[in-house]
Every structure is written in structure tokens, then in C-alpha cells.
Amino acid sequence: MSKVRILVGTRKGGFILTSDEGRKKWSVEGPLFPGWELFHIKGSPADPDRIYAAQSTGWFGQVIQRSDDGGKSWEPVGNEFQYEGDPGTHMDFSGNQHPWEFSRVWYMEPSPHDRDLVYAGVEDAAIFRSSNGGQSWAELPGLREAKGHLWQPGAGGLCLHKIVIDPRNPNRIFTAISAAGVFRTDDGGENWKPATNGLVSRYEIPEEKADVGHCVHNIAMHPSNPDVLFMQKHWDVMRTDNAGEEWTEISGNLPSDFGFPIVVHPHEPETIYVVPIKSDAEHYPPEGKLRVYRSRSGGQEWEALTSGLPQENCYVNILRTAMSVDTFDSAGVYFGTTGGQVYASADSGDHWTSIVRDLPAVLSVEAQVLP
Amino acid sequence: MIRVILPTHLWRLANSGREISLAVDGQPTIASVLDVLEREYPMLRGTVRDHVTRQRRAFVRFFICGEDWSNEPLDRPLPEEIISGAEPFRIIGAMAGGSG
């Protein structure tokens, strides 16, 4: 019987949650790397037992761990993330220029085809590539040439927090950076351009329709339809039907269009999920009710999914990388909270249960289906 | 042999145990001890000092014979008590620097 493995990164270590396709009974392993922040743990689609983990602390910096046995054992690999050449400066909060400084890895995206090829998104924002399983890393500096001097940190830092590879064409890659925007390369990472036309950030940046400066919280793609991307922006939920050439708003009837994660159903390319948060000033669900919102029409029309989720006195946040889907026929949807709960639905979001309730604050959730 | 005591996070990362012994050639200094440490335990590269600048990370401290040597020049010779192994070279995570 197939199994599902949920890789959970938290403020104080990593956890691995496993179950069978029924997804009723779960085993919980961890903490891995206790006391370290695990910003992201993700498995290789080409070899699910190859897992990469980004661990860091304020004391001892960044470490990258790699497992080749599904997380039973781990090996530290390369952790030298050196910007190519003189990285120059970017904007700081006050509008002054600030030197580019590496602080941590936010996101790791293994290649769909090659278990040794993996990309890392870092703070201060840049993308690195390793072709030897994380042993060494090289920056793709063309990204910073896309007006990097105008990028500025969001509240979480100037972080490159999402990397999406077009499954048809591995030379086409999208990155999302707070607060800079979405960027696309069509040549494997040498040249990048902002893909932000249609984004509007009123009262957030000096020119509300500027091509860089938008605080993009997450982007998502369905592999069967890679020209369509969905976005949870600081405010606004957006979609593009032409690979980022033009974005349109699809917030529709959401109770708030502020939030962090956005995911696509594994078998329905027009079914998407967000978790609305009250506002930029109050990072918790509106009315203290934890509600996942699902649109089955690619946006605009949204329904609240509440069965099994707390509907009073809930004031957690769901961070940008803390939501994922599995690929079982009856699709699983998962998310983790800053209160340490990990919720699971085995029926596309209709019903939810908590797998665990008292982990450290959850930073990332990634689901893998295993043969 | 120079005895080095590592903080919990680092000895777990190195899978070494809390105290390790390092053979350092010549006149031992902070820098030469760290050079040997990083050669013998490559997974610790970048965790005590920066890969590029080779400077101590902001929230790491060095204690030598009960004194804070964190801001001493990295090429300052270590005292006889450290060289003889009577006293350990302590690498410590600062009180600041954590989260949550």
C-alpha cells in the first residue's frame, strides 16, 4: 500500500509524519536537528528518499543536510553560499542602499528529473544551484541584475522564498521574492526579468504598478498547465494565464485577500486553496475562525472549508511554505500553523483533522507520496 | 593536543562528542586551532566563522582560561595552559542569537 510522508520544518527542528493512503493513523518522528530552525525540508521528485533540509540558527548560521534513505540518516553537505562577484547593494527599509549579505536558505527546490540538481532560494535574495547533491553551490547572478538595487526587504527579510520549475521546460523557472516580486528565466537562469505586470500595491510602494517592489507571498503552478500560475500577494490573490506576462486579481468573495500560502489541487488545475489572514497588522484568521478557502473555478468564487478546524478563539498564522498537497486519488491537503498544529484533509479539504497539535511554530510542510 | 569544547549544536552536527582533541602545529593561535577544527570536521565550516571573511560569527564566543577572547586578534598566541591541554579552548554560543 502506498504511503504518504509529510516533511515538517519548525522553529526548533524537523519532523516527519507518515501514514498510509487512509491517512487516519500517523506516526511522528522528530525532532530532527533539535533546536535548529528548519526553514524548509523537501524531497526529490526523481528519488523521494533523497531529501534536502535547510537548517540554521542565529548562532551558527546555515547548514544543509541531505538524506538518501527517506530521512532515517542525514549528512551535512555544502553550506557555502557566496554571491557571484561583487553583489553591490539593495534598498533597505529607509530607502538607503545596503550591502547584499547572506543570512539563510529559505527554500529548496529539487529538480523533477535529477536528484542531484537542486536550487536554493536565500536571504538576501538570490538563487543558487547545486548539480552535485548540495555539495557545492553556485549563484545564478542574472537574477539580481533584474533591478536588484531596487529590491527591499519585506517584514520577514529580503528573502527568495519560492522556486517553481516549468515541468515542460526546465529552462523556464519562476522565483518569488519579498518585497521584490516574481521573476522568470527562460534560459536556465542566466537572464531573468520581472513578471509582475498587473500587480498593484497601492500605498505599499511609491509606484503602485512598478515592475519591482511587490511583496509576493507565494506562487503555485499545476504541472499539467504550466502557463497558469496563482499568487498570494501581501494583499490580493492573483492568477496569470500566460506565464506571468499579465496577472489579474481573483480575490472575489474571500473574507480577506491577505495571506501567505497558496496551493493547487493535484488533479484539478483550476482548484486552488488559500488561508485568509485578517490583515498585514493582524496575522491571524478573521474572526478567530481557522478557514481554508477553496476555489474550484480558478479563483473569484471561494468556499470556506471549516469541518474539523477551530471556529473560535484561533489566532495562529499559516506561513508561506506551510501548506502542501499529496497526489493520492482522493487528494490530501496539509498545512501547519505558528501554534504548532499540522492539519490534514484526505478529501480535498472537505474534512480536516490535526495530525499533531503541539510542535514548535511550523515553517514548512511538504507532502510526498511513496510507492 | 589542544582540547576544544564545542557547544551542543556543533558537537551534534560534527557527531563528535562535546570535547575533541586537535593536533596543531607551530605556535597555536585562535586562527590555527580553527583551521585544524575545520579541516578535521568540515561540516563545521561556516558555523564558527564566516566562509569568506574568516571572522568569528557574531553570536559565537571564545573562552580561554576563563577569559573572553572573542574580540582578541585571531593570531594572538594561545597560553601554555591551552597548549598543554590543562585547560580547554571553549567555543560557546552567545546568550543572544537564538529565536523563540
Image (tube, coloured by chain):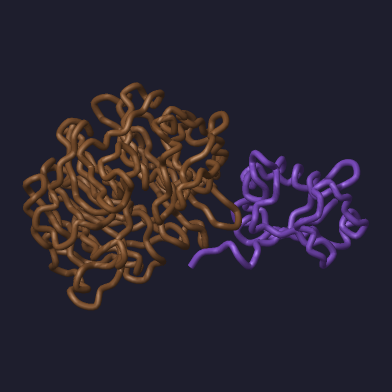
Chain colours: A brown, B purple
Residue A246, image x, y percentages: 18, 34
Q: Nearer the viewer, residue A19 or A338?
A: A338
Tell me where residue A101 sits by quadrant: top right
Tell me where residue A163 sits by quadrant: top left
Residue A112, image x, y percentages: 32, 33
Left or right: residue A178 versus residue B49 is: left
Residue beneath the point at 73% across and 46% down: B37
Q: Nearer the viewer, residue A252 or A65?
A: A252
Report the number of discs.
Answer: 0
Residue A230, image x, y percentages: 20, 43
> Which residue is situated farthest in the right direction here?
B80
Residue beneath the point at 44% across and 41% down: A125
Left or right: residue A244 versus residue A212 is: left
Residue A325, image x, y percentages: 23, 49
In this rendering, does residue A136 appear at all?
Answer: no
Residue beneath the point at 31% across and 33% down: A194
> Which residue is situated farthest in the front direction here?
A206
In this rendering, does residue A179 appear at all?
Answer: yes
Q: Nearer the viewer, residue A351 or A275?
A: A275
> Which residue is situated farthest in the bottom direction here?
A313
Left or right: residue B75 versus residue A318 is: right
